[in-house]
Amino acid sequence: MNFDFSEDQKFVQKTARDYLAQHAPLSACRAVLESDQPFDRNLWKGVAEMGWLGTAVPETYGGSGLGYLELVLIAEEVGRALAPIPFASSVYLATEGLLRYGSEAQKNKYLPRLCSGELVGTLAVAEGPGDLDPGTPAVQFDGGALRGAKLPVPDGDVAGLALVLASEGGRPTLVLAELGAKGVTQGPVRSFDPSRSMARLDFDGAPAERLGAAGQGGELLSALLDRAAAIMAFEQIGGAERAFEITREFTMNRWAFGRPVASFQALKHRMADLYAAIELARSNAYYGAWALSHDASELATAAPAARVAASDAFQLAGEEMVQMHGGVGFTWEYDCHLFYRRARWTGAVLGTASEWREKLVARLERQFTA
Amino acid sequence: MDFDDTPQEAAFRKKARAWLEKNAQPKRPDEVGADELGEREDPGAIAAAKAWQAKKFDEGWAVLTWPKEYGGQGLSRVEAVVWNQEEAKFKTPINIYGIGHGMLGPTLMAHGTKEQKDRYLREMARGQVVWCQLFSEPAAGSDLAGLRTSAVRDGSDWVLNGQKIWSTGAHYSDWGMIVTRSDPEAPKHAGLTYFIVDMRAKGIEIRPIKQINGGSGFNEVFFNDVRVPDSNRLGGVGDGWRVALTTLMNERVAIGGGAGAGRFRDLFQLARQARRNGRPAIEDSAVRQQLADFYVRAQGLKYTGLRTLTALSQGQTPGPEGSIGKAVGAPLGQQMAAFALELQGAVGALHDDAVVPQEGMWQDAYLGSPGLRIAGGTDEILKNIIAERVLRLPPEVRVDKDRPFRDIPSGSVKK
């Protein structure tokens, strides 16, 4: 039984952790949160130079030629640092989508620039409140041009490239659009987590080209979201664990009634519960990583399980962190709300836990009949 | 990142499977094994269990991790897990040796004299004698060190008086291991002594305890001037707590959430059969959300077990984080059972196997599951263990630690 990462992979993780500890302390997240800057450009540049953006991309396309097992461990560290960069959008969504479904021409055109960081990519699917995937999008793709609005689009204000789910002849089709082109308006919208930007994209005759075949958009989107969810689960677990560690440290040093508040059984039990939730999420994420890296059909159930567990664990960690800090947990000055906000952002951008529970059961229905 | 056996594990698995195929009948995929916290085993079942154990012992498949000198094979824990995985695929008698081979034998190996080890271990391994644990008392469960059964020295013997409770299998056991209070003047952890006791000794009375699910797998055991020779003392006088800790630490780490995964499929099937708002319940979105939640937790437990197995396979000793398995798994079992009964509606208030779905498995589970949340470490104690030993949060304030045992308040009549 070898249900663990290799020593080499763990070394990649350690390198990432050390780099981010130095270049992305929580103050970096706060700086973006409190300013008008959509992301930390220096950090993005540094991360690109480390080769992380192309971790799972073959060297022929400008990537590092490693794999998904390395990528998820880097994602965990990005999450642990609450790194204020468009890593998820550009890497788990745009880069991954191109790598899996792009033509040779599309891959050669965009992957090197995504890997170098000079181009930021994202995925534009949602069209307002409710399910992430609108089913038959209101955004139209007709005659090579896009018309309509997408809201919200993660990092849509800073991206230069977007994968867009549009309707072509009434059927969902995934298309590629350069966001600097005529007919695209990128409007920032206020994010619940201002350390991670969100935008509204308005298309008015913007040029776009198909990714995959016409009418194939639903399946491609579903498969892409599975892969992104499996990777994102690690980012969420990294964040949850960091929140847990800070909370533990705080409650060990905060005294009341003559002893550390960490010694009160109510808090000890809740910390045990939180620890268990994070560990179980980690185990589900490991299985997702296995399925991702082995291209296994099990990803269809492993990815939803990983996402639901990680989203719930990160949300719990954020809420418990605020609560266990007492009054100061409710202040702007303390870092609790950075985690509280990031848990919401990561828990929503790929679709909520409720949506993924529904997805999981639909797939189990098919699996348990077969 | 894979689920493969190492070459050594694979070779062992092949051997194990070959022997089992020759000596036992395979289970059908949907057959489950016997319950543990369940029925009072009938003599036929006990005899079958002993016969199977003797066969395994005689052909080299018993107590695999024990040293060869005591009847074992000197194998690793991961090989023992491989054996258990393979054996589980076959129809075998109930296992009545979990406590003896898993906890009491190792205690004897760690603390026994050469004479005691030679006298008891091989015989215990072959399974023709069965051992039980005599720890908990009516006034001392979670607070085990608060136990009161007394041991008073008399010549070359000790005289025991008191009562033990929740002793699984005492009614068919030949020997027991007991922790007693030998010095009530000492602080509670310091005045305990551990003994091997002959369950047929004069003065021992065993009474079954009936459980809420109707079974009576465990017992009260009364000690009325029971004489135990000093040669049956395990460890030093007053050293009983240290010996008891060895017993408790040898509780098998629960590997994998196998039972949980199997039950999920049954629950899923039930949701397809039951009706809600005129449609199959599986179409109801609240039902779907709840099913997903159970699945995610059950899978989380399963893969946590595989991570523990990986650590074992790599030669590491799994630590107290193994408590997560029971701390999460036991309440999950009860929640799934409760939900299943909800799906059954008014029929969920029946327990007639001829009438209720799935042969009453969920009625049985709802009655059996509270026991799993309490036995072998309650949910609350396990959370304390996780908090204190894994997370290293400060221990509980204790008002009874350094006082003579005699002076500790216990809620009974003032002394």
Image (spheres, coloured by chain):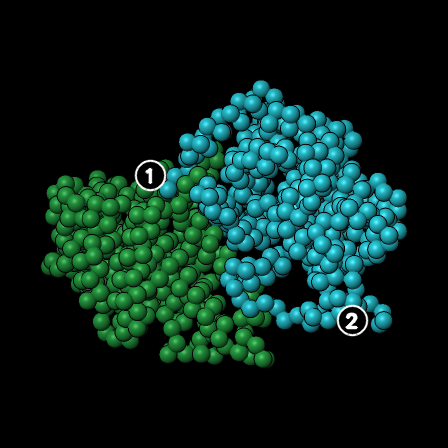
Chain colours: A green, B cyan
On-image quarter of the C terminus of chain B: bottom right
Q: Which residue is mark 1?
A: A294
| Residue type pointed to by label 2 | Asp
Residues beneath discs 2 and 1 located on the same chain? no
* Quarter where residue B154 is shown: bottom right
| Residue type pointed to by label 1 | His
On-image quarter of the N terminus of chain B: top left
Image disc number at residue B124: none
Q: Position of residue B234 (x, y in %)?
A: 72, 49
The residue sitting at 61% across, 51% down in the picture is: B249
Q: Position of residue B285 (x, y in %)?
A: 49, 50
Q: Position of residue A274 (x, y in %)?
A: 50, 61
Image disc number at residue B407: 2
Question: Does residue B356 appear left or right of residue A225 in this picture?
Answer: right
| Chain assignment, label 2 | B
Q: Is label 1 in a helix, a strand or a loop? A: loop
